[in-house]
Amino acid sequence: MIEGLHAIVGSEGVLACEPAYCLGRRTPATVVAPQSEEEVAALVKYAAKARFPFVIGGGGTALSMLEPPAEAWWLLSTRRLKGVVDYAPEDLVLTVRAGTTLAEAQQLLSQHRQYLPWNVPLPEQATIGGIVSGNRSGSWRYRHGTPRDRLLQVRAVRGDGVAFRSGAKVVKSVAGYDIHRLLCGAWGTLSVLTEITLKVAPLPPVFEVVGWFSTWDVLEPTLAHLMGAPLQPDGMTVLAFAGESLTAYGAVAHESQAIAPSGTGITPRASLIQASATGVLTPPPPVVYEEATQTFPEPETEAALQTEPATSRPFVLIEFSGRPEGVRWQIEWLRSQGYPAEPVEPAMLKSLQNALAPRTHRFMLQLLMRPNEVAEAMVQWSRPGVSMLAHAGSGVLYLWGESVEPIPFLTERLRHTAFRWRVLNWAEDARADLPPIPLSEGERRLMQALKQAFDPAGVLPRIV
């Protein structure tokens, strides 16, 4: 069967197996990289006929959440499905092949002062197909939404080798069912994306990021106040790390710098926040912060653990973009409310962004909740060895660590939580203990029907 796959793509389409293409300790029998949609269709049709299961990989940045087939399997890499198919800057519409990386797309768009408002981990490796397949957008989801909101059209190949198109290259379309949005977030379990059309955005003149250390007792009212404030941030993030300080991710800057997304070609600018803002609203009593320290003392008892998170103090990070005067006004408004908003180093921001790459950790969970539940959830899910990062404005909380010791605690929490959750990475020897993803009977039947319609031979992967 492997020889048949190799014959379709030729010797140039047979790649070496990299660590990023392994699922836990499971290694694919071969890695095959088609160069066209026709080759993709031929590969999938051959695999369906032979009942030879496979996994789809782009940069391999988030494959760890997929469950490898029990039998031998192979990997279809989109690495050679690269390049721009069509780009209309005047219409803000871009069509690329699925294996194009986010950094490559941003570099092209920046030449026309445009960009994709996504700040996902490892943008130099993450592909557009993988980002759309996982519906991943990063902290900028708070202002700009998810890839599903920018998706206009896709071309894809079903699990039986049939190629199809869904959507249209216009914002307002009545071209049938929104199958393309169904595939956005399916993680490659229903089809192989080959070509993607997106609505891009004008590139703001300025990117600025500020942050400060808070305390757990004031975090909830702080977030509530910020989300009701007259601000328009790109993202609002809360960080808390176990057993390490923020200096591991880059220190907080002493001088202001504007920060642009990777690949846009924008150079950090000088300080934008030296002038005083005008028109500041009458503030409520300011939140008073103690002098910032980086870690709590470790709890000594289980009772203490339940009331005091076993992590560093929370660090609130807010990202802004737009015209210089607008960004400056918003930062000065924060300071007028008593928030010690200090500029953040670009190195720290990039490290925090890349920390959310699942494959770089022993375990990683994603919890979905209402934004007003974030502060309490971070306290309740805290445990020695668990680091946390919340996209607070969007209600998305990530938990990760480098040791298996917290896994039994997290597994037990998952059995009783009311939050929606997703495993992004998990130690292989502990996966059997994971509870099933809570689905209603109707949801389960719908998913099974979709899987049967798109993948009748069962050769595409399943989610853990």
Image: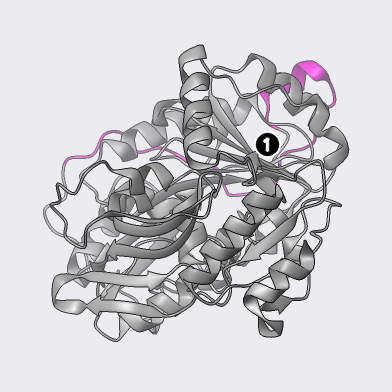
Asked which quadrant contains residue 270, the reply is bottom left
Front one among 99 and 103: 99
The image position of residue 461, as x and y in percent, is 64, 45
The image position of residue 450, as x and y in percent, is 47, 33
For the C terminus, give its image quadrant: top right
Using residue 358 as the reference point, say whether residue 270 is left or right of it.
left
Identify the main secondary structure in magenta: loop
Type of colouring: one colour
Residue sitting at x 61%, y 63%: 43
Chain part drawn in magenta: 282-309
Name the residue tied to disc 1: 464
The image position of residue 6, as x and y in percent, is 72, 73
The image position of residue 250, as x and y in percent, is 62, 67
Q: Residue furthest front?
A: 49
- Residue 438 vertical placement versus 14 (above, below): above
Q: How many marks?
A: 1
Name the residue type under label 1: Val
Work out whether residue 283 can be spotted. Answer: yes
Asked which quadrant contains residue 62, the reply is bottom right
For the N terminus, give its image quadrant: bottom right
Asked if the stretch drawn in magenta spans residue 299, the answer is yes
Front one among 224 and 45: 45
Using residue 115 as the reference point, say whether residue 460 is left or right of it.
right
Asked if the stretch drawn in magenta spans residue 103, the answer is no
Using residue 122 as the reference point, say whether residue 401 is left or right of it.
right
Asked which quadrant contains residue 68, the reply is top right
